[in-house]
Structures are given as C-alpha cells and as structure tokens.
Amino acid sequence: MTTTAAARQALGTYGESVAARHLVEQGLVLLDRNWRCGAGEIDLVLREGHVLVVCEVKTRSSDAFGTPHEAVGAEKRDRLGVLALRWAADHGLTPPDTRIDLVAVMRPPRGPAVVEHVRGI
C-alpha cells in the first residue's frame, strides 16, 4: 500500500469512528461497521427506533476534490438500498422502515472535525 493509499485509508477509518461516535451520541444504536458482501460495503448500520439506518460516511480534509455530499450520487444511493436489504436478510430482520443517511466529516488541518448528519439522502 502506498503512503497516499495508507493516508486515505487512515482518514476514512478516522471519519467512520467520528461518525459512529456522533450518531451514538444522538441516540442511534450501532449494529454493524464495515459490513461487506459481494455487492459492496456498508460503512455503518444503525437503528433509530424501529428504523434500520444504513449510513455512508464520507471524510475529507479539504473540498479540493469535491464535497462529501457530491460523492454520493443516485447510483451509490441505489446500491446502498440493495445492501440494506441484503444486510437485513443476512441478519434475519424485517425492519418496518429503512433509511439511507450520509455523514459528512470534514477534518480541518487544526481543531476538531466538523460533522454533518444528513438523514434520508
């Protein structure tokens, strides 16, 4: 793994940890992290009341290559919907409702990360 790839991976891991902590502090229950199957990966799986929440985490140290919001288009949202169904089926669950969220984490050069939770993308 190159230094750049390692740095990107470390930034992503950092962002997922920040996002998970933020969501749990907001009252969501963390069920799974980095769940993978042949169709892809879900960063975070949570529960909010009776709603299964599949969360995509995008972490940036700048917006030079676009904002975290711009990185999640219709194709990605559709894939996350399929993955949510697969996760629920693999865990023997039939949630009454499922939601796809985005957590955008901006890590500035100094100071704490800025976290934005967007429900229902």
Image (cartoon, grey):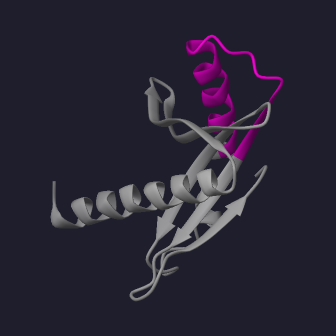
In the displayed structure, 119 sits above or below 84; it is: below
In the displayed structure, 86 sits above or below 3; it is: above
Foreground residue among 32 and 5: 32
Q: Residue 80 vs residue 50: left or right?
A: left
* Labels in figure, total: 0
Q: Who's the residue at 49% across and 33% down the image?
A: 40
Based on the displayed image, in which of its 4 quarters is residue 81 positioned? Answer: top right
Based on the displayed image, in which of its 4 quarters is residue 76 positioned? Answer: top right
Based on the displayed image, in which of its 4 quarters is residue 61 positioned? Answer: bottom left
Q: Who's the residue at 48% across and 61% down the image?
A: 18
The location of residue 111, given as percent across then percent down, is 44, 86
Foreground residue among 55 and 51: 51
The location of residue 68, given as percent across then percent down, is 58, 66
Q: Where are the magenta residues, as a range? A: 77-100
Q: Who's the residue at 45% across and 23% down the image?
A: 38
The location of residue 90, given as percent across then percent down, is 56, 14
Q: Is residue 1 visible?
A: yes
Q: Who's the residue at 71% across and 43% down the image?
A: 100
Q: Is residue 73 visible?
A: no
Residue furthest out toward the bottom:
110
Residue furthest out toward the top:
92
Q: Is residue 58 magenta?
A: no
Q: Residue 50 vs residue 14: left or right?
A: right
